[in-house]
Amino acid sequence: MIFKKWWGKSDKEAVEQGLQKTKEGFWGRLKRSVLGKDRVDDDMLDQIEEALIEADVGVDTTVEIIQRLEQRIARDKYISTDELHQILIDEIGSMLKDTSDQEGGVSEPPYVILIVGVNGVGKTTTIGKLAYRYIQQGKTVLMGAADTFRAAAIDQLKIWAERTGAQFYAKQMGADPAAVAYEAVQQAIKQHIDVVLIDTAGRLHNKSHLMRELAKIRKALHKAKPGAPHEVLLVLDATTGQNAFEQCKQFSEVTEVTGLVLTKLDGTAKGGVVIGLSHQFDIPIKYIGVGEQMDALKTFDKRAFLEALFSPQRADV
Amino acid sequence: MFESLTERLEMAFKHLKGESKLTEVNIASTLKDIRRALVAADVHYKIAREFTEKVKEEALGQQNRLRNVKPGQLLVKIVHEKLTELMGSDAVDIHLTGNPAIVLIAGLQGSGKTTFSAKLAKYVRDHKKKRPLLVACDVYRPAAIEQLRVLGEQIKVEVFSDEESKDPVDIARRAVEYARQKGYNVVIVDTAGRLSIDDEMMREIKSLKEALKPSETLFVVDAMTGQDAVNTAKAFNEVIDYDGVVLTKLDGDTRGGAALSIKYVVGKPLKFVSHGEKLNALDVFHPERMAQRILGMGDIVTLVEKAQAEIDEREARRLEKKIRKNQFDFNDFLAQIHQIRRMGDLKSLLSLLPGMNKVLKHIEIDDSAFKKIEAIILSMTPEERANPQILNHSRKRRIARGSGNDIHEVNQFIKQFEQMRKMMHQLSKGKGMFPLMQQFGLGKRR
């Protein structure tokens, strides 16, 4: 194959070995490279940079993190390699916005949550897990099937409602999503439901008419209950790279995203892009998805996430 | 597609404007920009680094031979060559051998396997004259089978499924048997999404492959995937040794750098790119064109092929004659709108034209604007459609009411139509295959 000829075998092997190396773990690698050194040097910073880039943190955010480290090193004069670990976690951690812990708490229920995101990130599954979570807390939940576009989306949500014991509101395929959302909330008010979860169709953020539809759904929710939606959760796939910035930007513009949900963190992807997102858009990461089971949705734990960012494989976060 | 990468590359090349010769020094910052552009487009950082190293060697080596070429141009040429080489030199077709030919679809959760399966079924039927059968082997995700069934209905392709069975291998085997009996000659097996580190699920896809011996195994990957693309692509390749890669959700600002990484790491050809939710939004992957697209050179060949597939030559000649005689009417207009809509969404179609990438970024093209026009035309009587000149005020008022529009909007549309007709008539004396394109008036500045 041509690309082999061009790169030559040794180069390709180098890359493969490189990839293998990342599996060994960042800290192990870093420890080896600092053996015999007692101070942080450029070589170490380079390695940190690579680890961040490889975790999808992105060029701009990585540059910012490295600059912060450099400033810290300059300020504190002497930083031992043992301290480096903690400093790194601190510095990156300070870029992540903290959550204000209001889970489903609203003086006059229902508490309405709108779930948005591009196609295939796991919106419906996230709703299933959220419903389970709230029901475990003793709350009543209603799911509104405002994805009236994708084939079998309504059926998929309905199965989740049955599994979790949530109430379910849907109309036929192709129905106006805003109308579904409005009526779902009305139904919830009538039945004194605590939490309403509104599922929406996956939409690529650059399709302006679909984004306008989302704004309309938001308006409909507000009309059905002033103050709603109380949360707008943008669901992001951990395997997504730098395109997540565009997603976050566009969705924020039409729906005022209040929190991020990072799904599929049980794979090999690290989802580092959320660091830049949380920092730039000032949005907290609320939940992470770590599997297909009902209980595989965890509240975001900053420290665990950052440890995992530099770990070879995502064990259990 | 690749809009941001193109823009970033353009910026990188600007740095070299005014330089008369490439040197180690002045090329360094440009290469750094290119490398960053590639990483920002989700190309794996190590691959980006090697890529720019190769470009540098080549560029410094070539410029002694090519004295009259400007440094910026030389770099564009080399980056283009290298990108094309990396992507593979020729388009590689899907293997459909055996009766029935079996195609196995695999990938992560949410990568778009089910939608792609349906698109592929439609593709092999319409373009390869085959009789496809879709098989629903995702027995895990709620309503996955139902989803495939609904899509199958939309494209009128039969879907084989068994809600009772939890054994994908068994379902697939029986589907192949069923295909033989019913005379289907292509069997497309949609499978559950799985993580590459889920050993049990990876064993399942392996046994599916071993049991079915497909003539084509395709790995489906989301074009928005980041640095992890190399890990996943490699892991799947080790287990099922797939024949080709499918890149999905390659719409708008999706940069698709993952495509480059995967090609480099596993060496398997990219066979299809899929964009949009319409079930015919599937393209065969052409490496040369993709490289050109990355560099913003446009992609005229794809556009022409698309148009040819959709526009019946005879119909085009008939239309041309009508235009020449200035008899183009609302019926013809409606037919043209339908043709264009069949080709996919307008924005992705227009973005294939050279230079349009930049223009389109600031223009919002609303496919639903077609709907308004359609509604107006459909509210006309057959007589009115064939004879635009008879539209008087009371007719227009009726049309406005019928189509749910304001009278001004109807007036405006008719005025635009008249202008277009005039212009097309003039153009017809020259050539002008796509008079509609310039005349839509659908683009609004943001």
Image: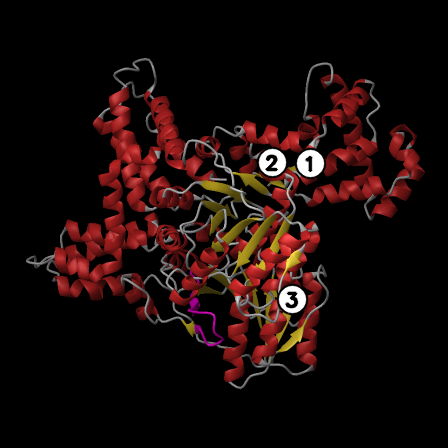
- Tell me the element at label 2: helix
In the depicted structure, whether residue B388 falls above or below residue A158: above
Q: Quadrant of the C terminus of chain B?
A: top right
| Secondary structure at numbered mark 3 | helix
Does A148 appear above or below B36? Answer: below
Local packing at callout 1 (Cα closer than 10 Å; few below 14, some 14-19, many 20+) is: some
> Which label number is shown at residue B361?
none
The residue tagged 2 is B349
| Image coordinates for residue A231, horizontal then vertical, percent | 53, 69
The chain to which mark 1 is attached is B
Q: Is residue B331 above or below residue B150?
A: above
Seen from this angle, which residue lies furthest left? A36
**Looking at the image, which is closer to me, B28 or B118?**
B118
Q: Quadrant of residue A14?
A: top left
Which of the 4 image quadrants contains residue B19? top left
Residue picked out by circle 3 = A154
Q: Is residue B275 magenta?
A: no
Q: Which residue is mark 1?
A: B340
The residue segment tinted magenta is A282-297
A32 or B204, which lies in front? B204
Q: Secondary structure at mark 1?
A: helix
Q: The residue marked by circle 3 belongs to what chain?
A: A
Q: Are marks 3 and 1 on the same chain?
A: no
The answer to whether marks 1 and 2 mark residues whose Cβ atoms lie closer than 8 Å is: yes
Q: Residue B80, can we see it? A: yes
Residue flagged by tag 2: what amino acid is it?
Leu
Specify the amino acid type for callout 1.
Answer: Ile
